[in-house]
Amino acid sequence: MDKEEITEYNDDLGIFIFYIALKNLVYIFWS
């Protein structure tokens, strides 16, 4: 795994975590 691949993976992970956090916030506010 070279540096570029790791950066790409981290970006995907960040988006994934952000998406889950956003979903949880929406769930809390609308429940």
Image (spheres, rainbow, N blue to C red):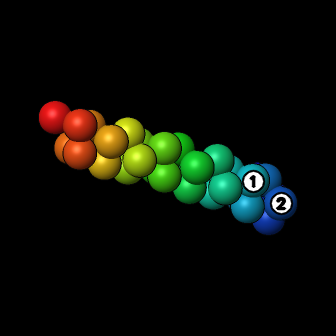
Determine whether 2 is above or below 22 in the image. Answer: below
From the viewer's side, name the closer residue of 2 and 16: 16
Res. 7 in view? yes
Tag 2 residue: 4
* Mark 1 in CB contact with mark 2 (< 8 angstroms): yes
Res. 24 in view? no
From the viewer's side, name the closer residue of 3 and 14: 14
Quadrant into which the C terminus falls: top left
Crowding at dot 1, Cα within 10 Å, few <14 / some 14-19 / many 20+, comes out as: few
Crowding at dot 2, Cα within 10 Å, few <14 / some 14-19 / many 20+, comes out as: few
User: What's the mark number on residue 8?
Assistant: 1
Distance from disc 1 to disc 2, alpha carbons, whole Å, reads: 6 Å
Residue positioned most to the bottom = 3
Is 6 left, or right, of 19 in this rendering?
right
Is 30 left, or right, of 18 in this rendering?
left
Q: Secondary structure at mark 2?
A: helix
Q: Secondary structure at mark 1?
A: helix
The residue under label 1 is which amino acid type? Glu
Please name the residue shown 64% across and 47% down the image: 12
What is the x, y in percent for residue 1? 76, 53
